[in-house]
Image (tube, rainbow, N blue to C red):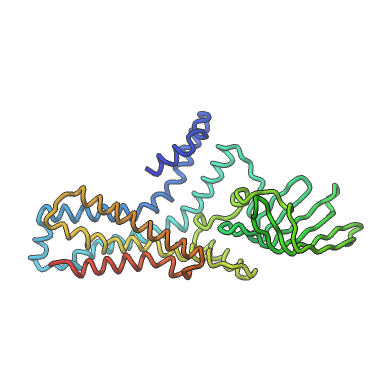
Amino acid sequence: MFITIEFLEHMDIFTDSFKSFLLSLVYILLRLPHYFNLLLPLASLISMLILLIMMVRNNEIIAARTSGISTISLMKPFIACACGLIILSFVIAEWIMPHAANAADYLYRVKIKKDTSYVHFKNDRIWFKRSNILHNIEFYDAKKDIIKGLTVIELNDDFTIKKRIDAKEGSWKDSAWLFTTVTERTFGNNAIQSKSVYPEMKGLIGEPPAILKTGDKNPEEMGYRDLSKYIRKLKRDGHDVRRYLVDLYNKTAFPFINLIMVFVAFSVGLRYSKTKHIAKGILVGVCVGILYWFIHNICLSFGYAETFPPLFAAWLSNMLFFALGIIGVVTLRT
């Protein structure tokens, strides 16, 4: 389903030529680790529900309970399997997804769209050049569209500095960047000739936020170690990192849903003692998975909006579903 949506969304570009079509197949293959990691909890939940309902159909649950096997004992193999899935999810998210995502982004923008980006992310900063003017952005908040620490350097033909402009902060308003606390210096004969300070200034850069986002690092495409290192660097520079902390904590919270789904599967699947329809179990699994994604994304949104603390926002949905799963298992009729 995800592959089909991905292909249909960019069909006009993917089918532009035979070469683009072949490259699009490679692009979709590079996107598979992201989809696999995203769907792993739902797939494990549905498979456990199918297995439990089949055990109910064949009266294996009754046989196990009459033999003195408790629900907790039945859950042990599932819990062991879920722990393996947690490790697998961590490995995919830390070592496979970042490289695959970067390669997919490069393949799509440069090889398929033929869009040679002039905006680059290097040394934890955004750089781009227009004619003889060099721009450097120290920090760009892609969620708020705020620039902090802009430096604009205009060069002469002999590559000496003609003018330098430093702005403390800028925000995207009315389809333009408005910068505050702007300092402008002009140079000549290897010395500062003039210096001016302005409270506000427009027109320092013409690139919209969409262009800057192509050069900015996406936390979802970074591993835990890279994102943690990036956050430490932003802290040293005095930037607000709460939104990035939400993504960092989410990288540890999301894989554990594979374990929580074991409790959810048993609390739901073993209630089908009178209903032996596998289709109904699959429907319940899909609904539970969609409900988790919905609640989890809402919690993350509250974290990005700084309504919830980052750690609480990343783990709230896990704690909620784990509590519901425990309650469901404890209240099962044995």
Q: Is residue 44 above or below residue 232?
A: above
Residue sitting farthest toward the front: 174
**Residue at horizontal 47%, vertical 58%?**
94
Residue 156, image x, y percentages: 85, 50
**Residue at horizontal 67%, vertical 46%?**
118
**Left or right: 63 in relation to 123:** left
| The quarter of the displayed image where residue 290 is located | bottom left
| The quarter of the displayed image where residue 5 is located | top left
**Left or right: 201 in relation to 310:** right
Quadrant in which the C terminus is drawn? bottom left
Quadrant in which the N terminus is drawn? top left
**Residue at horizontal 41%, vertical 42%?**
3
Q: How many marks?
A: 0
**Residue at horizontal 72%, vertical 53%?**
135
The front one of 98 and 290 is 290
Residue 293, image x, y percentages: 38, 56
Residue 316, image x, y percentages: 39, 67
Residue 311, image x, y percentages: 45, 69
Residue sitting farthest toward the top: 18
Q: Is residue 59 above or below residue 235?
A: above
